[in-house]
Image: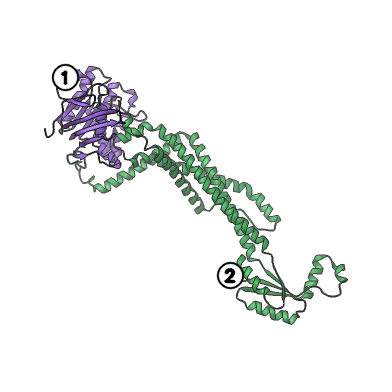
Amino acid sequence: MAETPNRGKEPSRGAKTARSPLKQQANSYIDHHRKVARDSARRLWQAPVASLMTWTVMGVALALPVALMLLLASLEGVSAGWESSARVTAYLAEDVTLEQAETLKQTIGDDSRVAEVELIDRETALDEFRASSGLEDALDYLDGNPLPHTLLVTPGDGSRTASGVQTLLAVVEGMDGVERVQVDLGWLQRLNAMTELLGRAVWALALLLAAAVVLVIGNTVRLSIENRRDEILVAKLVGGTDAFVRRPFLYTGAWFGLGGGVVAWFLLQGSLWWLSGPVERLAGLYRSDFSLSGLTLDGMIALIIAAMLLGWLGAWVAVKRHLDDIEPGEIAGG
Amino acid sequence: MIEFRQVTKRYGSDHTALRQVNFGLERGELAFLTGHSGAGKSTLLKLIMVMERPSAGEVVVGGQVLNRLPRRQVPYIRRHIGVVFQNHQLLFDRSVFDNVAMPLEVMGVPARDIGRRVRAALDKVGLLSKEKMNPLQLSGGEQQRVGIARAVVNKPPVLLADEPTGNLDPQLSSDIMGLFAEFSQVGVTVLIATHDIALINQLDRRTLTLDEGRLVSGGGGLHG
């Protein structure tokens, strides 16, 4: 439009206002964003009950998977602690002498995957058994000592995983004089399998709930688009770009997300406070130092940012579906 | 400024709103567009606003052929076209000032310039004292003037009006026509769709008459 009289022809009004047009454009763009963000936030405040309800729905939907993730992280901490204390017990053959057992202890101890080997000779073992089992009288009837020498092998740092322990087990088992090797890994593996399963279930749940959040926000924003239909029509009529028209709704979505994230955080902290006492008592009964860990500051910020992104996404879905349908063609009469 | 070249607009297969319409309007020209209801007046205006696209022929505004304009370019064309509606299309959730400011906000005009330009536009239509009021508090004629202020606040080179005096008494109508005439004097191309014959006779300007989609008088202009 060569003959357009209104484009960038504003006379400069003195040095004070003579800034570069590009900078001025950028400033005005940022001002506009600020204004739209403020305006969207104010609209939410003006309908506090409706907004609070949306925030709560979002908060619950977000708090649930996050709570499960926190629980999972606590459980993994526990199993990691126990895993490191896993020891391989090697029972030697009955005809192995104490000297041979000492040699075997040496050989195993030299392996780099082994941190420590402890030899429990058959006499000590019998004494311990006698003391702890309460079967003293029965043991007296035996001719000799039925117990073999035993080696307790503690894996080195590098082998303190389920598979590392498994390898070590095979090595020790293959040695001459070793009759049977035992390690109580079964329950550990079961716990690991369960936490892994739980982990996947939590992620699946998180994805489903995130989708629910997007849909809830999408629906809420759709209603607000309907409410502001006239405004959208006029904005499009006077030359508002799609981005301009979408902006307030995207901010609305993000604000819904912010509120939802904050509600989720409160819910999490509240439940943590409510549960921590009983959990500690229960853990105490198991002689475990297990405790529920709450969200760190980083975690809280991540939660809120994720919530805002979800809100924004929900708004975007609604805007994409409904805003493009509103065209000013329908307001000019026949 | 505005040129229609053999423009035809069909809706579906059975309804033809415009048939091979040909005309041109110069810069600063004021013309009326008239005809019975359903003669195609609104369709013609919608084609200029790019609310509709022609089925055949070319619509040219400001040297730009609108047929091939990509969708995302449409808002930028609309910024050069002010529109006044019979039913004003004002927003009642904000003040007169904010209504008039909309075209400027859409363009990203800095806030301090918005104030100055909105007041200039309101001054032009004689409503400077009512900038803080809600449009609902204004009379029909005043609302129409707010609509006009909004249409001209960003100084568009083209001004379209669809039955701008539809609900107004003759005195107000004549005032509003006076405003349109002033705009055309400063170089704005003004096209007013109306079937108010008295008004047309009063101003004695070029009149495009549509009848069942055909331009039966007032065509031509621009390159003969």
Which of the two residues, B96 or B65, is positioned nearer the viewer here?
Answer: B65
Furthest residue toward left:
B224
Q: Residue at x 57, y 54 (%)?
A: A199
Is residue A121 in sight in this rendering? yes
**Residue A300 placed where, x, y %?**
51, 50
Q: Which chain is mark 2 on?
A: A
**Residue B102 placed where, x, y %?**
30, 35
Quadrant location, the C terminus of chain A: top left
At label 1, the amino acid type is Asn
Answer few, some or many: residues within 10 Å of disc 2's Cα (few below 14, many 20 plus, some between 14 and 19): few
* Residue, disc 2: A158
**Residue A137 placed where, x, y %?**
87, 68
User: On residue B181, which mark appears?
Assistant: none
- Left or right of residue B182: residue B151: right
> Could you give the CA–CA distance between mark 1 and mark 2, rounded to whole angstroms?
99 Å
* Residue, disc 1: B201
Is residue A293 in sight in this rendering? no
Q: Give above or below for B166 relative to B131.
A: above
Q: Colour of chain A?
A: green
Q: How is the image coloured?
A: by chain
Chain represented in purple = B
Which of the two residues, A19 or A48, is positioned nearer the viewer here?
Answer: A48
